[in-house]
Amino acid sequence: MKLLQSRILRYAFFGIVLIIMVVVGMELLWTHRQSSLAKEWRSEMVSSLTSSDSYEDIESTLSHLGVMLGEEDDAWVAIDYRDTHNKHIVSSAVARMMNGELFVSEEHFCGKLTGYKSAKKQVGDIEGLIGQETDPNNIDEYKALLSHIQESLDSYPKLKELEIKSDLVRQRELLFELGFGPIESERE
């Protein structure tokens, strides 16, 4: 009887060890896949952000999660971003300043960039409506809505500052504060 119990315990032990090895192995494979995916995205984003010096061309290459900050005739920053929430979160972002400097981040921005971009577009749309409207009651409603949306933009202070700053040194500092680093550090 003791021999049977000993064998059962031994098989149970080896079974548990085997299960642990399979789970750890799968986790290691998934981690490798995540790293490969982030590197693939980064390479694609760098390629698209460096393919032109034109504001319009770069803006058109951004993914739906990316954002263009600043105006064409001023210092601008393009941030392209991709992520997935499949099992583990994988994020990759590349920022390009007007002067061609590139920065990378694995910060999970999720909806922050698109939320900012959407609020910015809504501000422009509502300002256009206010300019066209003749009814004072509608103008007041539009202004109240505009105020609310502008408050939502205030919840993105670093993006908002990046949008209005034409000082390249300050833009670089803001990118660092957002979690970006120089792309050279990625190659080392």
Image (cartoon, helix red, strand yellow):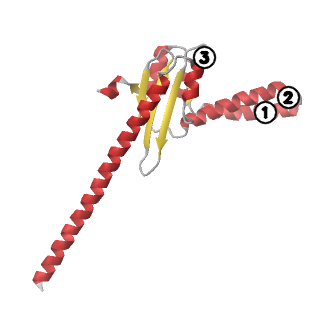
The local secondary structure at tag 3 comes to: loop
Labelled pair 1, 2 in contact (Cβ < 8 Å): yes
Which residue has dot 2 on it? Answer: 133
**Depth order, front residue of 183/51:** 51
Label 2 neighbour load within 10 Å: few <14, some 14-19, many 20+: few
Inter-mark Cα distance, 2 to 3 = 29 Å
Please state which amino acid type lies under the numbered disc 2: Glu
**How far across and how far down the image is residue 108, in percent?**
46, 39
**How far across and how far down the image is residue 130, in percent?**
80, 27
Label 1 neighbour load within 10 Å: few <14, some 14-19, many 20+: some
3 or 1: mark nearer the eye: 3
Please state which amino acid type lies under the numbered disc 1: Tyr
> Which residue does the image show at 45% across and 20% down from the upper left?
172
2 or 3: mark nearer the eye: 3
In the image, residue 24 above or below residue 100? below
31 sits left or right of 146 in the view? left
In the image, residue 52 above or below residue 91? above
Inter-mark Cα distance, 1 to 2 = 9 Å
> Which residue does the image show at 23% across and 63% down from the upper left?
18
Which residue has dot 3 on it? Answer: 72
Labelled pair 2, 3 in contact (Cβ < 8 Å): no
Where the C terminus falls, by quadrant? top left
